[in-house]
């Protein structure tokens, strides 16, 4: 690994700043709050944090509608706080990745204010404007990614045209065909890179370019996507090759800042298409979206992991998350008990970059919708509730939190789990520490194995270290037969009660219900 490719061996941690830690007692998490918790993150063992947006925003999409790309929203602190966070994180050996939202701005961004002011405004063409159809309908059949928002077009009275918004009407899409937009966004990249950020998470990276003729999406495809639960997946737009130009441009800029990288959010479940977006001359890695759409079955995970591995460019690494601020939490999707433990073992041992969403390490669940109604337009409040530092909530804020806590904070919290060797938090720490010490997990080859049962088994290997990972997805004990493996092994880690250090025969493992194990083949460390 080249020194500046640290991200290849990193464990990431996603912080949703509103909900992580509130230092000034207004019920909203902030950047100084993150600084206060860097020690916790260092002990967890993560190498980098990805901060969801903290830029000024009217919150139509909770920060993904940005009204100033080069500032910090006062509710999160100041630019000085950001610089301090960067400095202190680096002192802890933790890098910082920030969200880059390039597809759209907020309606309140001055660029848009200017663009909508008249048809002849110099920034008119910075956004995508079109006439309504003769019958008064929107210019084409494109839909917003959010069901509630309906068409992706809003008629704007003052100039009598519609503007495109792939998300809420508060998020007009930028026109990336306009060179001035590209130049303005390059400045945004440099603004954060010059401050010292270590990378970008690129929001909806595949959707930057729109069909120049604004042609309708193909009806059948739009229809076929309707069952997809992912908020961004309701309609298929064509992947336009020009989008890759933009991503290459971003890459050229990143290449001039040593040790930086781009992590794409490319919410397409088609692994073949996804594979085109990372590992080449564009973004370095991208989330493996289909991974978080799988039912709790070993074969389902194996299939999607193997498929993306087969399509990915040589050496390319996907990023694995179990949950995000858009996706329900692991415990909510799969249940509690042993499953989140097996899921954690899977995410931290696959060939790829694990990304832990805050609170996943203690097994937080989605909270039921707030009594006075959902705040988020797409119903994602439940997965964004405040971090459960302790049973009273004081660890998050001394004020009432912006979103109510989940009701299980008394049982599920950091304080309770910190010193309990059997807690999920302790398991996460063990897994991350084990990965850090294991060349095979950090950079080894991956090969999945046929072993029957509801078990996902794979080898991770480098010259000198070979590990077998076997994950039992079944709620009952399962005997695993792997006759091709050598007879001697040593149990390194069990998500259940298996005792680390005990000798095992990798050819025939017996896994407890919902147990995952890491076995060193050959037995010697
Ligand atoms: C993806 C983000 O993760 C999501 O929260 C947001 O709503 C959309 N992109 C639009 O920016």
Image (cartoon, rainbow, N blue to C red):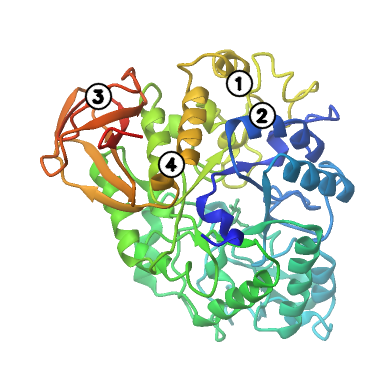
Q: In this figure, which residue is indicated by the disc labeled 3?
A: 503
Relative height, residue 102 to residue 62 (above, below):
below
Residue at left 84%, top 27%? 25
What distance separates the C-alpha of mark 3 from that of mark 2?
33 Å
Residue at mark 2: C-beta within 8 A of ligand 1: no
Instruction: Out of 418 and 231, give the one closest to the viewer.
Output: 418
- Secondary structure of the residue carrying numbered label 4: loop
Relative height, residue 304 to residue 504 (above, below):
below
Q: Which label lies toward us, 4 or 1?
A: 4
What distance separates the C-alpha of mark 3 from that of mark 1?
33 Å
Relative height, residue 416 to residue 461 (above, below):
above
- Secondary structure of the residue carrying numbered label 2: helix
368 horizontally vs 199: left or right = left
Question: Can residue 304 be seen at all in this image of the molecule?
Answer: no
What distance separates the C-alpha of mark 2 from that of mark 1?
10 Å
Q: Which label lies toward us, 2 or 1?
A: 2
**Where on the image, by quarter, is ligand 1?**
bottom right
Q: Position of residue 524 (x, y in %)?
A: 31, 33
Residue at mark 4: C-beta within 8 A of ligand 1: no
Q: Position of residue 5 (x, y in %)?
A: 57, 60
347 horizontally vs 129: left or right = left
Q: In this figure, which residue is indicated by the disc labeled 1?
A: 414
> Decide: marks 2, 1 in contact (CB < 8 A)?
yes
- Secondary structure of the residue carrying numbered label 1: helix
Instruction: Out of 506 and 374, give the one closest to the viewer.
Output: 506
Marking on residue 40: 2
- Counting residues from the start of the chain, the first of labels 3 and 2 encountered is 2
The 10 Å Cα crowd at callout 1, few under 14, some 14 to 19, many 20 or more, is: many
Marking on residue 438: 4
The 10 Å Cα crowd at callout 3, few under 14, some 14 to 19, many 20 or more, is: some
């Amino acid at each position: 690994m080249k020194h500046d490719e640290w991200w290849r061996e990193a464990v990431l941690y996603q912080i949703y700043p509103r909900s992580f830690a509130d230092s000034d007692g207004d019920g909203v998490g902030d950047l100084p709050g993150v600084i206060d918790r860097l020690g916790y993150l260092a002990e967890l063992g993560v190498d980098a944090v990805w901060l969801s947006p903290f830029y000024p925003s009217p919150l139509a999409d909770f920060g993904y509608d940005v009204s100033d790309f080069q500032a910090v929203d006062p509710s999160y602190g100041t630019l000085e706080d950001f610089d301090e966070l960067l400095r202190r994180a680096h002192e802890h050996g933790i890098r910082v990745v920030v969200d880059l939202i390039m597809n759209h701005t907020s309606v309140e961004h001055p660029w848009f204010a200017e663009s909508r002011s008249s048809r002849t405004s110099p920034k008119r063409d910075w956004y995508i404007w079109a006439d309504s159809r003769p019958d008064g309908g929107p210019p084409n059949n494109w839909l917003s990614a959010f069901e509630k928002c309906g068409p992706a077009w809003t008629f704007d009275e003052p100039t009598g045209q519609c503007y495109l918004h792939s998300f809420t009407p508060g998020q007009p899409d930028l026109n990336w065909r306009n060179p001035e937009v590209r130049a303005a966004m390059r400045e945004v990249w440099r603004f954060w890179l010059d401050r010292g950020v270590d990378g970008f998470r690129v929001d909806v990276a595949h959707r930057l370019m729109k069909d120049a003729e604004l042609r309708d999406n193909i009806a059948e495809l739009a229809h076929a996507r309707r069952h997809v639960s992912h908020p961004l997946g309701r309609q298929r737009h064509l992947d336009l090759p020009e989008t890759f130009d933009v991503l290459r441009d971003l890459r050229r800029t990143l290449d001039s800042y040593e040790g930086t990288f781009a992590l794409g959010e490319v919410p397409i479940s088609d692994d073949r298409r996804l594979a085109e977006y990372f590992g080449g001359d564009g973004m370095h890695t991208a989330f493996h979206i289909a991974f978080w759409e799988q039912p709790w079955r070993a074969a389902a995970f194996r299939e999607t992991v193997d498929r993306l591995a087969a399509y990915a460019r040589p050496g390319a690494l996907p990023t694995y998350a179990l949950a995000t601020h858009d996706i329900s939490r692991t415990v909510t999707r799969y249940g509690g008990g042993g499953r989140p433990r097996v899921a954690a073992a899977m995410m931290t041992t696959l060939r790829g970059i694990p990304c832990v969403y805050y609170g996943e390490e203690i097994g937080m669940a989605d909270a039921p919708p707030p009594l006075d109604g959902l705040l988020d337009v797409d119903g994602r409040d439940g997965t964004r509730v405040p971090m459960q530092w302790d049973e009273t909530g004081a660890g998050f804020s001394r004020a009432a939190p912006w979103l109510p806590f989940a009701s299980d904070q008394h049982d599920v919290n950091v304080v309770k789990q910190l010193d309990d060797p059997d807690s999920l938090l302790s398991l996460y720490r063990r897994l991350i520490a084990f990965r850090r010490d294991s060349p095979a997990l950090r950079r080894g080859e991956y090969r999945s194995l046929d072993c029957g049962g509801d078990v996902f088994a794979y080898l991770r290997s480098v010259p000198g270290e070979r590990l077998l990972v076997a994950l039992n997805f079944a709620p009952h004990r399962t005997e695993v037969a792997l006759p091709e493996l050598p007879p001697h092994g040593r149990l390194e880690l069990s998500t259940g009660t298996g005792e680390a250090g005990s000798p095992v025969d990798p050819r025939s493992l017996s896994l407890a219900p919902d147990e995952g194990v890491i076995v060193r083949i050959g037995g010697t460390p």
